[in-house]
Image (cartoon, coloured by chain):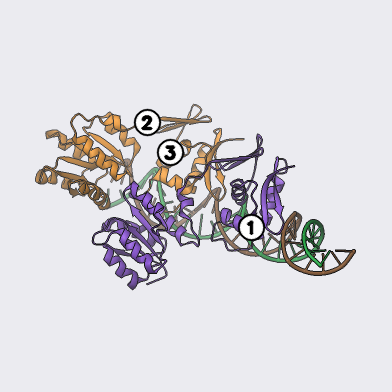
Chain colours: A purple, B orange, C brown, D green
DNA sequence: GTTCGATGTAAATTCTTTGTAAAAAAAAAG
DNA sequence: CTTTTTTTTTACAAAGAATTTACATCGAAC
């Protein structure tokens, strides 16, 4: 009961069992409910840390279950739906779901999302939205699909975190970003460490971008910004 | 009994239940069979209007079941197979299947095909979109129809999973692919295992591609990508 | 100019990821 | 059913990165 328990609500027992198989492999305990009322009851008795909720349910549909749960708790909820047009409602109406997946779903992706939602400050739209696969500023081009950085025609070798940091900066050229913001953008919301870690990677990037027409400028007392030289 | 009944033959009960879930939603009645002999018996007793038949079966394999059914009936058959190379046999040897799908399959697509087969004058080859039957990158050529790999003129012997992994990489040359993505592409969404299984096959492929002009590069912290050497 | 917190950065440390051989398990062939 | 082959898992070494530390330096305010 409690700290590893996930409640899976679906009227199809198979869906519950599929989820159970994959989630238990990752150390979660899975409790199933086949109706909306059963779900509400199990939330009380089992104290789950997250609920996976199908929209289509007998007795009490997913919308209603979600509304009632949200009335008095912040239990993370991942919605499941078979219909694409429900997605807009989930996203648009701010029902309070933390994330959603369309059925039929990829079970490993479900596990990944459960973990993501359980991380502090997860922003689902960032996961679901397509990010551009290429950024350019000055004579620097960053390709996210190949994870390559080029200064003019010359490829530049950057490490994982340097790459992520550079992308974060390229997403907001000219804007001053605090170390906190950069940690959120490049490390994720659950990073647990010194803000000054950013400085070290900035230093590395500055060296590697020395030959380019852009640079990472210090905004004293604030953070950093990406600017064109001169 | 009869006019809406579909017989689903698969030794994996989950596959049957998945099909049942979706087919029943569309008004069909689903009868399951887990072995070839059970399938033949159920054809007599249940009089299905269509059979969905997995090739890999205990007792009597799908080929044999199909042959025996075809000996004295025109029952529409949709073949399921996990192996791409079986597809050639199904299509080429005119075994008598009306359509086929490779596993893992999209259940909604299965429903669509069931309906299509039941429509008169259905032409399956039009639905099974051609995927390229040949990929080449550097001096490596991969033929999906013959499942052969050549480095220049020299044939290279690769195992099934190595082949599938190589195809996945060849479909996205230069792109960084995570282990998850590679599992989805080469193993299927329902693979239930360690992501590091990918690494082992990558190591094997690297040895076999050592003499070629391409290689599988590690993208640290991310996954792998296929690139030309130098 | 002096002070003091903020920043730069090299080096040390710690942590993660990856390569790979070998064992185990599973699947295919006989 | 037994043998062979393939696939997956495991375990550990090695490589590679990320983070922290420590100290030098800088910049703003007075």
Q: Are marks 2 and 1 on the same chain?
A: no
Is A23 on the left-hand or right-hand side of A58? right
Position of the C terminus of chain B, as image quadrant, is top right
Q: Name the residue under label 1.
A: A179
Q: Going from the N terminus, do you reach mark 2 or mark 3 first? A: 2
Q: Give whichever of A65, B49 is nearer the camera.
A: A65
Secondary element at image label 3: helix
Q: Give whichever of B82, B48 is nearer the camera.
A: B48
On the question of residue A105 being in view, the answer is: no
Q: Distance between the residues labelled 2 and 3?
A: 12 Å
Residue A121: image x %, image y %?
Answer: 50, 60
Seen at 17% across and 44% down, the residue is B6
Q: Name the residue under label 3.
A: B163
Seen at 48% across and 39% down, the residue is B169
Residue B186: image x %, image y %?
Answer: 41, 43
Is C22 on the left-hand or right-hand side of B8? right
């Amino acid at each position: 009961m409690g700290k590893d328990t996930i409640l899976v609500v679906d009227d199809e027992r198979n869906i519950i069992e599929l989820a159970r198989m994959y989630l238990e492999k990752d150390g979660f305990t899975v409790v199933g409910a086949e109706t909306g009322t059963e779900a509400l009851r199990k939330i009380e008795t089992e104290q789950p840390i997250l609920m996976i909720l199908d929209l289509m349910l007998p007795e009490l549909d997913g919308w209603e279950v979600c509304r009632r749960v949200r009335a008095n708790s912040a239990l993370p909820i991942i919605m499941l739906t078979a219909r694409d047009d429900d997605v807009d409602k989930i996203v648009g109406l701010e029902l309070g779901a933390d994330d959603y997946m369309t059925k039929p779903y990829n079970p490993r992706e479900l596990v990944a999302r459960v973990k993501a939602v359980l991380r502090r400050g997860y922003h689902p739209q960032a996961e679901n939205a397509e990010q551009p696969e290429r950024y350019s500023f000055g004579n620097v081009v960053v390709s996210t699909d190949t994870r390559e950085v080029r200064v003019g025609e010359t490829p530049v070798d950057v490490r994982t975190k340097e790459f992520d940091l550079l992308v974060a900066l390229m997403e907001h050229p000219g804007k001053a970003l605090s170390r906190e913001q950069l940690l959120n953008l490049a490390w994720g919301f659950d990073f647990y460490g010194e803000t000054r870690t950013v400085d070290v990677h900035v230093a590395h990037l500055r060296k590697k971008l020395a030959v380019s027409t852009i640079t990472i400028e210090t905004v004293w007392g604030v953070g950093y910004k990406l600017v064109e030289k001169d």
